[in-house]
Amino acid sequence: MVDGAVGYASWPIWAVLIVGTVAFWAVIFLAVRALFVGRDASGPPDPDDSRDPEALRERLARGEITVEEYVHLYAQTDTVAGRHSSRPPHR
């Protein structure tokens, strides 16, 4: 009868241990994910880089963006700058 009582009383302890272990590893996983997600080797993007037409041309030349992305981003720079042309300049 003693063994049955001890076994019955110990299930809440096991539940706490299991939940605590899962919570611990979840916190570790989320902390590591928060440190590394969204980072790349080139560093943080420059917020003014997307608004500068010269920077867009350089990104296009390096192959970082496609021609379609260039035209779209360039149209946004025109809207921001107050110019309402949606066509990129010709060289």
Image: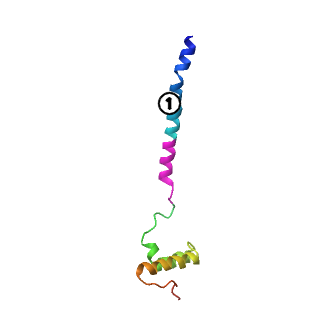
Q: Position of residue 62 (x, y in %)?
A: 55, 74
Residue 40 forms part of the magenta stretch: no
Residue at the bottom extreme, as displayed: 91
Q: Which residue is mark 1?
A: 16
Q: Secondary structure at mark 1?
A: helix
Which residue is more in the foreground, 69 or 10? Answer: 10
Q: Position of residue 18 (x, y in %)?
A: 54, 32
Instruction: Decide if residue 46 is on the left or right side of residue 5.
Output: left
Residue sitting at 52 percent across and 45 percent down?
Answer: 29
Q: Which residues are magenta?
A: 26-39
Going by the numbered disc 1, the residue's amino acid type is Val
Which residue extends farthest top?
1
Question: In percent of the image, x 53 and y 37: which residue is there?
Answer: 22
Residue nearest the observer in this picture, 31 or 63? 31
> Looking at the picture, does residue 61 appear above or below residue 20?
below
Is 77 in front, or is 12? 12
- The residue drawn where x is 47% and y is 52% is 35
Number of residues whose C-alpha sits closer than 10 Å to that of mark 1, classed few (under 14), some (14–19) or many (20 or more): few
In which quadrant is the N terminus drawn? top right
User: Whole-percent x and y of residue 40?
Assistant: 51, 61
